[in-house]
Image (cartoon, rainbow, N blue to C red):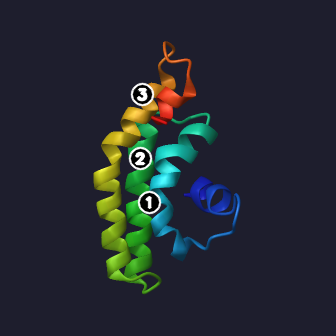
Amino acid sequence: MDFYVNEFLLYEDAVEAKDGTYEIGMYLGYWFIKKAMWANIAAIKENAASLKKFYQFMCERGQILEEEFSTLKESIKEGMPEWLATMARYDDPDIEDMEEVWKL
């Protein structure tokens, strides 16, 4: 969570954690893969689980709406297969063209 809140959300335009629910796809599907030296498939799954717990806590405390939390969970569910595939491509030594990694 520290990396997400204190690095990613503050990287370009400072985004408060309560407003970060819509940034999950960019974080897990791109930024984390590129910026975290320890990024791998297991780390993406662990981060997704931690983010769900974090935002569930924020929802229970009234910091975010239930709808935002539901959207976050759905984004993780729908995005996870592609994020894991992107991570696998990123780690594939046979892929030299970054456009293939990011499917550009």
Rounded to the nearest angstrom, the CA distance separating label 1 from label 3 is 21 Å
Residue type at numbered disc 3 = Ala
Mark 1 or mark 3, which is nearer to you? 3
Rounded to the nearest angstrom, the CA distance separating label 2 from label 3 is 16 Å
Residue sitting farthest toward the front: 104
Q: Nearer the viewer, residue 14 or 59?
A: 14
- What residue is rendered at 60% in x and 57% in y? 2
Mark 2 or mark 3, which is nearer to you? 3
Residue type at numbered disc 2 = Glu
- What residue is rendered at 62% in x and 34% in y? 37
Residue 86 at x, y = what percent? 43, 34
Residue 87 at x, y = what percent? 45, 33
Say which residue label 2 marks: 46
Q: Is residue 93 above or below residue 9?
A: above
Instruction: Categorize mark 1 by other alpha carbons within 10 Å: few (<14), some (14-19), many (20+).
Output: some
Say which residue label 3 marks: 88
- What residue is rendered at 49% in x and 36% in y? 104
Q: Earlier in the sequence, mark 1 or mark 3?
A: 1
- What residue is rendered at 42% in x and 27% in y? 88
| SS under mark 2 | helix
Q: Is residue 90 above or below residue 49?
A: above
Say which residue label 1 marks: 51
Q: Earlier in the sequence, mark 1 or mark 2?
A: 2
Residue 6 quadrant: bottom right
